[in-house]
Image (cartoon, rainbow, N blue to C red):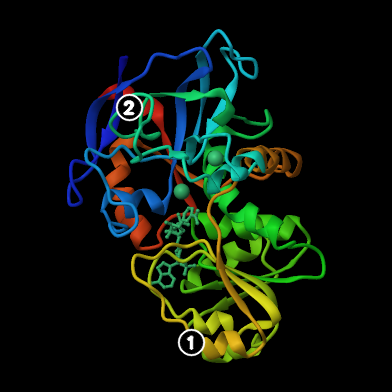
Amino acid sequence: MYNAKAYSAASASSRLAATKISRRDPAEHDVQIDILYCGICHSDLHQVRDEWSGVMPTVYPCVPGHEIVGRVTKVGSAVRKFKAGDLAAVGCMVDSDRTCPECKAGMEQFCPNFTLTYNFPDKLSGGVTYGGYSESIVVDENFVLHVPANLQPAGAAPLLCAGITTYSPMHHWKVGKGKKVGIVGLGGLGHMGVKFAHALGAHVVVFTTSPKKKEDALRLGADEVVVSNDANSMQKHAGSFDFILDAVSADHDINAYLNMLRRDGHVVMVGAPEKPLAVSVFSLIMGRRSLSGSPIGGIAETQEMLDFCGKHNIVSDVEVIPIQKVNEAYERLLRSDVKYRFSIDMASLKAE
Ligand SMILES: NC(=O)c1ccc[n+]([C@@H]2O[C@H](COP(=O)([O-])OP(=O)(O)OC[C@H]3O[C@@H](n4cnc5c(N)ncnc54)[C@H](OP(=O)(O)O)[C@@H]3O)[C@@H](O)[C@H]2O)c1
Ligand SMILES: [Zn+2]
Ligand SMILES: [Zn+2]
């Protein structure tokens, strides 16, 4: 084991602060990575503040971060896919059983025995896993991704969660040319959703509570923008969407979006608000509409998404911050005041 600098929260009401954590030395299949950038996902905030206590209660101290890009420093003797000096990435999972039907189908995100990157029982070292708000991480090579060389690392980091979480459902529900697609909430996930839906050739409509984001939405690839508290503009789209991706982090009226679907359309939740949403069954019955959810994506699909981003020159729009600003960044995230993802420059951790 070795010590690594990190930022952790000591309780649901604590600010994140500098600490040291233990990491395992790389074993034969492991890749050791010096972390260059780690994105700040709203899930980090939910988890740090124990807002998902009913589903995945937080174990403290908690070191969040699952949007990791870094440089490989060391590899185990059996590692074939990476070598020291490579640019590499780690997302929301660091292991799975690799034997269940989900793993065999390449959908590790549904493995009953997966290991999430942080706040999850660590089967190898004991305790819980620690995430990317840290100077380095050690991960099995099968859960490490290659980053296309043309993508700048600070903007590539958020692809590992915000990217794959929006790419995967669009792939599954066949978003493409001729489809009318809605994106609800122009945050970290939402703005990636807009970029992907646009690149896939769909007609993209953004629903936002923030009128000041209108121009950005169009620049990011939206064809239309609707401010969601404007009832008239909302009414114009009733019954017209094939697919709506809901990336909102807080309580909101889901029925407004279900009613915008055409026959057999889908609203897919990727946002994970703390409290249950109230669903009017009539919104579903009328039009045989579906409401679904989707978690991150599999490892092969994550690589496919990164390669797609390489080909289309897609990265996240980021505001790069030093780790010392992480608590302020969380407050700004709650005010929807980020364009459109914070990416932590992990070199700043050296000052701690
Ligand atoms: N399914 C998964 O695997 C997965 C993966 C990652 C994240 N998540 C979840 O996805 C959600 C979004 O994450 P994120 O990192 O994109 O967060 P984010 O950057 O904070 O974006 C959330 C957006 O939701 C909108 N919003 C916030 N409060 C709202 C309210 N009260 N009513 C209506 N809209 C509101 C805002 O957009 P506007 O300003 O445009 O209205 C905001 O920018 C979080 O709950 C996160 O935990 C799920
Ligand atoms: Zn995330
Ligand atoms: Zn499995």
SS at badge 1: loop
Q: Is residue 145 left or right of residue 90?
A: right
The amino acid type found where label 1 is placed reads: Ser
Residue drawn at 67 percent across, 45 percent down: 314
Classify the position of the N terminus by image quarter. Answer: top left
Residue 344: image location, x then y, percent: 41, 37
* Residue 185: assigned label: none
Q: Which badge, 1 or 2, is on the more N-terminal residue?
A: 1
Residue 5: image location, x then y, percent: 29, 24
Q: Nearer the viewer, residue 304 or 93?
A: 93
Residue with the mark numbered 1: 280
Q: Quick check: marks 1 and 2 in contact, CB under 8 Å? A: no
Q: Quadrant of ligand 1?
A: bottom left
Residue 322: image location, x then y, percent: 36, 35
Classify the position of the C terminus by image quarter. Answer: top left
Other residues around mark 2 within 10 Å, as few (<14) / some (14–19) / many (≥20):
some
Q: In this view, does 86 lie to the left or right of 263?
A: left
Residue with the mark numbered 2: 349
The amino acid type found where label 2 is placed reads: Leu
* Residue 317 can be seen in this image: no
Q: Which of 325 and 192 is in front in this view?
A: 192
* Residue 61 can be seen in this image: yes
Q: In this view, does 100 lie above or below 220?
A: above
Residue drawn at 48 percent across, 25 percent down: 139
Q: Nearer the viewer, residue 36 or 10?
A: 10
